[in-house]
Image (spheres, rainbow, N blue to C red):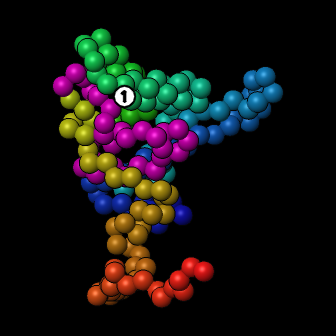
Amino acid sequence: GHDRIKAALPQDASLVSYAVYSEGGVRTIGKPKRSYVALVSLSGARVPTVVKLGTADRIEALIGRWREEASKPPTDQAAMTRYLEAGEALRRAIWDPVTPIVSSSRLVFVVPDGAIQMVTLGSLPIDADRYVVEDGPLIHYLSAERDIVASLGGERTGSGLLTLGGPDFDHYPAREPPK
């Protein structure tokens, strides 16, 4: 549970869990309204801080635009400007809202969800010359919150070392000649 995860967090670390959810009761053309939220856990905090990030449509459009601009070769200054604008807009939407909370953390564990799984936060631009990876805390990705316990040595899944050697790459099983 949350208490175990909180106990596993070092003093200088935090956990940001992104989640996409459907808002109950709010319908748009027969479909639930989807939104993104970040749950930010600090080692000393009793409960995570909930940071609402906005609608899934908006955030996924920003991710799509950034990925599209990132896939194009920077042929000229206009292309570079479009890439930076797309990256900065995405950073403002999904990273900037959590940075005041994790500002004292040296290490931030991130559990992405939805389209945010396609974003490497450290590669988002701060300005024309700097990126999140250069300016912010160290970011370490996890596939689930429980992985924090294992990644910090709280659980051991095995011991020892398995060594295999001497493979014969040129050995082929005997085959009968074709008839």
Q: Is residue 133 visible?
A: yes
122 drawn magenta: yes
Q: Which residues are magenta?
A: 102-129
Q: Residue at x 50, y 57 (%)?
A: 144
Of the 4 image quadrants, the one containing the C terminus is bottom right
The residue at the point 75 percent across, 23 percent down is 28
- 79 relative position to 45: left or right: left
How many numbered marks are there?
1
Q: Residue furthest top?
A: 78
* Residue 45 appears in the figure: no
Q: Position of residue 31 (x, y in %)?
A: 76, 30
Q: Which residue is mark 1?
A: 70
| Residue 73 position (above or below residue 165) | above
Q: Specify the amino acid type for callout 1.
A: Ala
Residue 31 is left or right of residue 77, and the answer is: right
Report the residue at 37% width, 66% height from top: 151
Depth check: give the residue in front, 142 or 155: 142
